[in-house]
Image: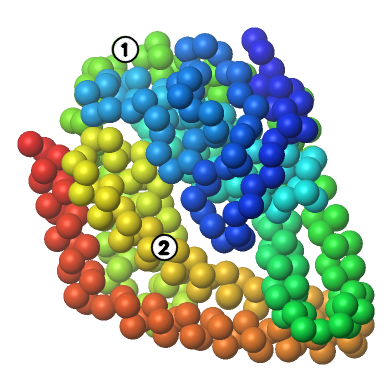
């Protein structure tokens, strides 16, 4: 079988860096990428010239669950394999490689969860664990990329040498944080992770269970409802509590990715209105979380550095991040009202009722 990771590593040298800003989760990818080359039965449709973004091409409500699961899982998992080599070997050119890798693992993980009852146990758990391992390997690198961007923003108007030593210290720490990404890429190459993906997809293809044969439109609600209910339950919590707000953000992210996977089974309002509402909500909560994470990273740096200038500079950055975090939280609570929750409930109910018709 063609070795996907070897092929993807080779194409890493031909990936065109993107120009998207840090924090953008659209995951549309660069303008041009080399074509992945999975086995023919799992290949992404010819119309797709870039890795899968929000929507998976070639999915319809009339397809069998079996074919839909194969299409979505193939697209999501091979997209992870696409981003892993450039994230491991060319991240110095473009921080988006690491960011897109993390986003791709989240989307793939949600797809595996959604179709878990159709997947062979022997490979499902391994694939899920591997996706978590990839994302974890990239966490520190991503945090430092964001910290560097924040530093450059904070240093605007200052002389270059005022922040040069601090920037160099971040770069050195960032080089260390790159090693886990390189290590996981080499590990998966050695373990033939692409073979594990193919095995899992073949398990779907050869399944004889009746629910494999049902139309995707008929089963889509059963895939969406559990994650939708968890989100709506989290929405009823006291969101002045940081943990409750964090849980709502996580549930909104899972719901967003699930909606991307089932959208073909619903009428246009689901994608054009309800999905946009959930995306906007999750983006705002993501911005709140980014500022909270920045405070944590800065506090860690302040605690562990022996350089007095660095401590003083990062304390100033932490104060700015604290204010930004508080402002964003206030903005979220101004928007997130009982009326909004009721509207979302009503829209979900109406979309689900229309899907049954």
Where residue 284 appears, x then y in whole percent? 44, 69
- Residue 112, image quadrant: top left
Q: In which quarter of the image is the N terminus?
A: top right
Depth check, mark 2 against mark 1: the one in front is 2
The residue carrying pointer 2 sits among few (fewer than 14), some (14 to 19) or many (20 or more) residues within 10 Å by Cα, namely many
Above or below for 334 versus 194: below
The residue carrying pointer 1 sits among few (fewer than 14), some (14 to 19) or many (20 or more) residues within 10 Å by Cα, namely few
Judging depth in this view, the residue of 284 and 298 nearest the camera is: 284
- Residue 194, image quadrant: top right
Residue 62 vs residue 145: left or right?
Answer: left
Q: Which residue is drawn at 38% across and 52% down?
A: 256
Q: Which of marks 2 and 1 is nearer the N terminus?
A: 1
Residue pointed to by mark 2? 282
Q: What element carries label 2?
A: helix
Where residue 145 appears, x then y in whole percent? 72, 61
Judging depth in this view, the residue of 232 and 121 nearest the camera is: 232
Judging depth in this view, the residue of 316 and 65 nearest the camera is: 316
Where residue 53 appears, x then y in whole percent? 48, 41
Above or below for 62 versus 173: above
Residue pointed to by mark 1? 208
Residue 253 vs residue 66: left or right?
Answer: right
* Picture disc at residue 287: none
Q: In which quarter of the image is the C terminus?
A: top left
Q: Is mark 1 on a helix, strand or loop?
A: loop
- Residue 203, image quadrant: top left
Answer whether residue 296 is visible to the viewer in this image: no
Answer whether residue 332 is visible to the viewer in this image: yes
Q: Residue at x 80, y 55 (%)?
A: 177
């Amino acid at each position: 079988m063609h070795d996907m990771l070897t092929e993807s590593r080779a194409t890493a040298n031909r990936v065109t860096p993107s120009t998207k800003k840090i924090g953008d989760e659209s995951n549309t990818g660069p303008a041009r990428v080399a074509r992945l080359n999975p086995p023919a039965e799992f290949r992404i449709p010819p119309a797709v010239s870039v890795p899968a973004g929000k929507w998976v091409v070639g999915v319809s409500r009339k397809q069998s669950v079996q074919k839909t699961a194969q299409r979505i899982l193939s697209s999501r998992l091979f997209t992870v394999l696409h981003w892993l080599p450039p994230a491991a070997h060319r991240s110095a050119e473009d921080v988006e490689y690491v960011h897109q890798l993390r986003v791709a693992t989240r989307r793939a993980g949600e797809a595996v969860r959604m179709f878990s009852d159709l997947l062979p146990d022997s490979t499902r758990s391994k694939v899920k664990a591997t996706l978590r391992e990839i994302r974890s390997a990239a966490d520190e690198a991503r945090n430092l990329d964001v910290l560097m961007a924040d530093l450059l923003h904070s240093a605007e108007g200052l002389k270059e040498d005022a922040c040069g030593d601090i920037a160099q210290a971040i770069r050195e720490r960032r080089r260390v944080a790159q090693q886990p990404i390189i290590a996981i890429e080499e590990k998966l190459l050695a373990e033939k992770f692409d073979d594990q993906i193919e095995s899992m997809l073949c398990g779907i293809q050869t399944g004889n269970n009746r629910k494999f044969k049902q139309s995707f439109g008929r089963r889509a609600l059963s895939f969406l409802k559990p994650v939708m209910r968890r989100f709506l339950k989290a929405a009823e919590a006291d969101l002045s509590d940081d943990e409750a707000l964090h849980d709502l953000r996580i549930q909104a992210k899972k719901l967003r990715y699930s909606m991307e996977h089932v959208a073909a089974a619903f009428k246009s309002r689901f994608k054009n209105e309800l999905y946009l509402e959930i995306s906007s909500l999750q983006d705002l909560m993501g911005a709140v979380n980014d500022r909270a994470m920045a405070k944590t990273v800065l506090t860690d740096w302040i605690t562990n550095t022996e350089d007095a200038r660095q401590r003083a500079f990062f304390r100033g950055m932490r104060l700015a991040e604290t204010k930004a975090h508080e402002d964003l939280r206030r903005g979220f609570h101004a928007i997130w009202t009982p009326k909004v929750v009721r509207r979302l409930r009503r829209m979900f109910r109406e979309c689900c009722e229309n899907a049954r018709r």
